[in-house]
Amino acid sequence: MKKTIFAYLLSSSLLLSSCATIVSGSKQNVKFSSNPSSATIFIDEVEVGKTPFELKLARNSEHDVQIKLDGYQTYQTTLTKKFNAWYIGNIAFGGLIGLIVDPITGAIYNLSPNEINAQMNKGTVFNSTKKGIYIAVALEIDPKWNKVGQLEKVSN
Amino acid sequence: MKRLFILMLPILLLSCSASISSSFTSQYKPLTIDDKVAFLDLLHKVPEGAKKLGEAKYGDSGFSTSCDFNTNLISARKLARANGANIVKVVKKSTPDLWSSCYRITVEFYFYEGDVSKLPQYQLQIN
């Protein structure tokens, strides 16, 4: 009986005394959209869906985001970890246990930004294969580039 | 004393990444984000002709919280790309237990001339 009461008290204190975990949870909803839509979203190089899309991501690590659409430059950004102010609530309500539990669950962090709206830049088509030559087609010339050749229309 | 402990605790807990030690015997030209890197788990075999470039150990720093298997592999992939490796081979894996909530892994880095995307490999999971 004593053990049951102890276990109950311990689990209650663990579950109920972690401010950020209770309020925010260990995962965060992140919204992805793009203009134009239907671009493919990659999180840490894993394809997760097409825009517009919503996904719950673990707060305890940063995530690399790539949004790709044929004919457009790849949009890249990183979801970074920022301090979650709810963690401070532990000092008032949770005490020591909350201070430990929130970092373990990742609730001490907020992923930033929590909404990504990718404005896809038109003008680049990029297809690559390991065995062949690959050509990028760009409508805008980067001043750093050196011209090395000219494509010509083949007449039959 | 208690106040000091409470004040110090978040600082200690903010250093949450796994402890990493790495060594490279040779380095190749860094790979770009478009170059594929394959994850080979314990059961996957390194293809013949692949050249070993180095290895890394991912452990528990004592305050590690972001140290699950996939997070460690993502970190290893960055290290691999920076040193020109396109294969991350897991050679030792300890799952979380009573003493550590972290995956503790040892990985080796290889460069392979062929197409690594065709190798049987571990597929990364998004948390």
Image (cartoon, rainbow, N blue to C red):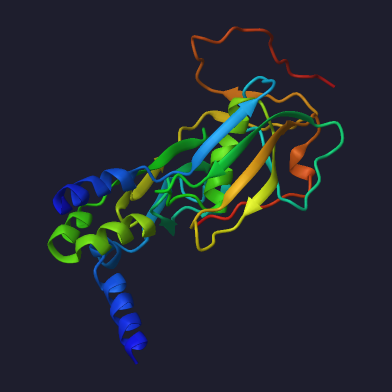
Q: At 59% across and 58% down in the image, what residue appears?
A: B95
Judge from the rendering whether residue B12 lies leftward or rightward of residue B102; answer left or right: left
Q: At 56% across and 42% down in the image, what residue appears?
A: B58
Q: At 64% across and 43% down in the image, what residue appears?
A: B106
- Percent across and percent down for residue B47 are 83, 39
Judge from the rendering whether residue A14 lies leftward or rightward of residue B2; answer left or right: right
Whether residue A69 can be seen here: no
- Percent across and percent down for residue A87 are 22, 56
Q: Nearer the viewer, residue A145 or B73?
A: B73
- Percent across and percent down for residue A52 are 44, 55
Q: Quadrant of residue B85?
A: top right
Q: Is residue B31 above or below residue A40?
A: above
Judge from the rendering whether residue B63 lies leftward or rightward of residue A84; answer left or right: right
Q: Nearer the viewer, residue A76 or A112?
A: A112
Q: Quadrant of residue B82?
A: top right
Q: At 62% across and 7% down in the image, what residue appears?
A: A147
Q: Nearer the viewer, residue A33 or A141?
A: A33
Q: Is residue A79 above or below residue A131?
A: below
Q: Quadrant of residue A10?
A: bottom left
